[in-house]
Amino acid sequence: MKPVCEVMVSEVLPGVRAMVAKKLVEDHGFSQKIAAEKLGTTQPAISQYKRELRGHRIQILKSNQKILGMIDSLAKRTASGEIDRDHVSLEFCVICKYMKSSGLACKIHKRMHPSLENCSICFEKK
């Protein structure tokens, strides 16, 4: 079984990056090469995101208005130059943190591993 953080990296992060990349290219008129530079990835990765060959498991992201707003804001601030590539990475962490605190990360994790139905590790107080 993969830990929740590994699930976030392999399943969610590519989806978030794909959604931001699509916005940069389609809504803000960036070339795939410039979008890749802004996101700290490669042009071929952007092409795969655009064609939904990578980062396509994002239905849970598309159904959450808060996450959609976070992604839209991230794309706008990236496009305007308000934040640089390093800060884009930090914003991905903010989205992941929100997903963990809201229970969305658990929902994805439990969907992948039904044996975790009664798991509450993410919500335990330290």
Image: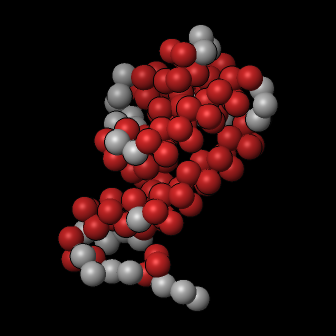
Q: Position of residue 98 (x, y in %)?
A: 54, 58
Q: Quadrant of residue 48?
A: top left
Indicate the quadrant containing the N terminus: top left, top right, bottom left or bottom right: bottom left
Residue 32 visible in rendering: no
Q: Residue at 28% of width from left, 67% of height from top?
A: 110
Q: Quadrant of residue 108?
A: bottom left
Q: Position of residue 106 (x, y in %)?
A: 37, 66
Q: Residue at 49% of width from left, 44% of height from top?
A: 67
Residue lying farthest to the front in this orientation: 65
Q: Is residue 64 above or below residue 126?
A: above
Residue 48 visible in rendering: yes
Q: Would residue 73 be found to the left or right of residue 67 on screen?
A: right
Q: Would residue 88 be found to the left or right of residue 51 on screen?
A: right
> How many tags in the picture?
0
Indicate the quadrant containing the C terminus: top left, top right, bottom left or bottom right: bottom right
Q: Position of residue 16 (x, y in %)?
A: 49, 41
Q: Is residue 22 above or below residue 64?
A: above
Q: Quadrant of residue 117?
A: bottom left
Q: Position of residue 27 (x, y in %)?
A: 54, 16
Colour style of the rendered protein structure:
secondary structure
Q: Residue at 47% of width from left, 33% of height from top?
A: 18
Q: Would residue 84 be found to the left or right of residue 111 on screen?
A: right
Q: Would residue 2 be found to the left or right of residue 68 on screen?
A: left
Q: Is residue 8 above or below residue 40?
A: below
Q: Residue at 34% of width from left, 42% of height from top?
A: 63
